[in-house]
């Protein structure tokens, strides 16, 4: 009889652990093995709370004056990418669908002025094929913002379209993948911290966090401007995961920082220098050289990361500033895309760096001393 009781206890614990692992797999959270019973209870409560359709917080965010919105900026080190290295899954929704725009006709008049038109005139003209295609569906966005106006959703969509447009110009539109984005903006700090803790994260000193395992991000609403910047930042992490797979931290965070200050003028997407690290378009913080930054992959979790974020932003902004830099980024990004479950080593990255940009050290040093210009897409 004693052996029978032991057998029952043993089977109970086996089932307990199996249930925890299954929950761990489907929720993308980090399991606390030091307290298995308590962790199972927390996972159960977490899953139960996700079934409830009402938002985590029903309190409306405090109104912020226009002046405050214009001058309130969130430091980039308030973001945290919650990496999941336990498994590699394709979180994309497949290829992006496109439709081709018609041919463009061009001619020069008697005064030497060039003309372009999508309608063929009644005289001989040359046909210009720009090989431009228009996206039909870059992403599937699920944005849970129960206390925010619908204009927030629309503005975010426009900014994320600029991200895809820029990526398409770097790696080619046919290398893009459709992305499922799950963003939740929480109106109170307590609701945000609760959501992060329930998923095994640490919300301390963060305004947003992206979880690779569930392909979802949570953002704390402080004010409209900061919430938008954080939403774009975390969405870029999801885009990078779906389009490129796992990437070096400097590349992932650098692009997330790069696209934070994105705006649009008609059909043109504009990316401005990140004011967390610049003033009057000049850099205000000391940054690592790019070849040194590449070798710091293991130091992101140690101490103050502000210099790492600033350096990553500066590296991406520099590379996006020239055709040679974009050619290097294209090589890096397409190579990462071929092996989405692994990151390029620092050794291989440096080899690519010096092969394509042999004068990098001098050019980067000179570039940092010059005012930065906005990038148009």
Image (cartoon, grey):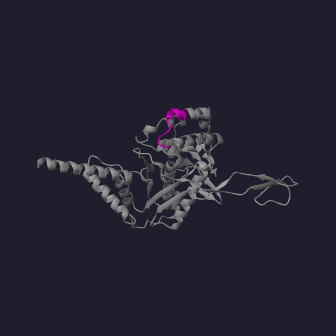
Name the spot of residue 62 as percent of width and height, x first. 44, 65
Q: Is residue 233 magenta?
A: no
Would residue 202 be seen by someone viewing this image from the given angle?
no
Residue 275 percent location from the top left of the image: 54, 50
Most foreground residue, 345 or 73? 345
Q: What segment carries the magenta color?
A: 340-350
Q: Left or right: where does residue 362 sit relative to residue 6?
A: right
* Residue sitting at the far right: 110
Q: Is residue 348 magenta?
A: yes
Q: Residue at x 82, y 60 (%)?
A: 121
Does 107 sit left or right of 262 as displayed? right
Q: Residue at x 43, y 38 (%)?
A: 299
Q: Position of residue 58 (x, y in %)?
A: 39, 67
How many numbered discs, if any?
A: 0
Residue at (41, 42) in percent of width and height: 301
Rendered position, 319 above or below 47: above
Q: Is residue 301 visible?
A: yes
Q: Can you tell which quarter of the image residue 357 is in?
A: top right
Instruction: Where is residue 211? Give x, y as percent.
Output: 42, 51
Q: Is residue 337 above or below residue 113?
A: above
Observer-nearest residue: 178 or 189?
A: 178
């Amino acid at each position: 009889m004693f052996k029978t009781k032991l057998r029952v206890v043993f089977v109970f614990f086996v089932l307990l652990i199996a249930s925890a692992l299954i929950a761990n797999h489907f929720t993308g959270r980090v399991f606390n093995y030091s307290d298995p019973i308590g962790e199972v209870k927390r996972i159960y409560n977490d899953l139960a709370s996700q079934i409830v359709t009402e938002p985590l917080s029903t309190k409306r965010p405090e109104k912020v004056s226009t002046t405050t919105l214009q001058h309130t900026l969130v430091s980039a080190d308030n973001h945290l990418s919650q990496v999941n290295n336990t498994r590699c899954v394709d979180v994309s929704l497949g290829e992006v669908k496109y439709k081709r725009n018609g041919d463009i006709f061009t001619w020069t008049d008697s005064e030497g002025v060039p003309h372009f038109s999508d309608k063929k005139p009644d005289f001989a003209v040359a046909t210009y094929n720009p090989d431009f295609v228009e996206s039909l569906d870059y992403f599937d966005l699920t944005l849970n913002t129960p206390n925010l106006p619908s204009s927030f959703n629309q503005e975010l969509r426009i900014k994320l379209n600029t991200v895809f447009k820029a990526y398409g110009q770097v790696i080619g539109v046919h290398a893009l993948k459709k992305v499922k984005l799950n963003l939740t903006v929480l109106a109170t700090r307590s609701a945000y911290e609760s959501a992060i803790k329930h998923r095994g994260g640490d919300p301390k000193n963060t305004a947003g966090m992206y979880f690779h395992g569930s392909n979802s991000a949570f953002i704390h609403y402080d004010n409209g401007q900061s919430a938008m910047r954080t939403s774009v930042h975390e969405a870029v992490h999801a885009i990078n995961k779906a389009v490129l797979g796992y990437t070096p931290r400097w590349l992932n965070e650098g692009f997330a920082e790069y696209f934070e200050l994105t705006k649009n003028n008609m059909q043109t997407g504009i990316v401005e220098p990140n004011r967390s690290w610049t003033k009057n378009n000049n850099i205000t913080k000391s940054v690592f050289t790019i070849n040194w930054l590449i070798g710091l992959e293991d130091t992101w979790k140690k101490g103050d990361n502000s210099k790492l974020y600033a350096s990553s932003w500066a590296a991406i902004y520099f590379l996006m500033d020239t055709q040679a830099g974009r050619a290097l980024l294209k090589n890096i990004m397409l190579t990462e895309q071929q092996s989405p479950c692994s990151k390029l080593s620092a050794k291989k990255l440096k080899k690519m760096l010096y092969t394509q940009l042999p004068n990098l050290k001098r050019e980067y040093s000179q570039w940092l001393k010059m005012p930065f210009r906005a990038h148009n897409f």
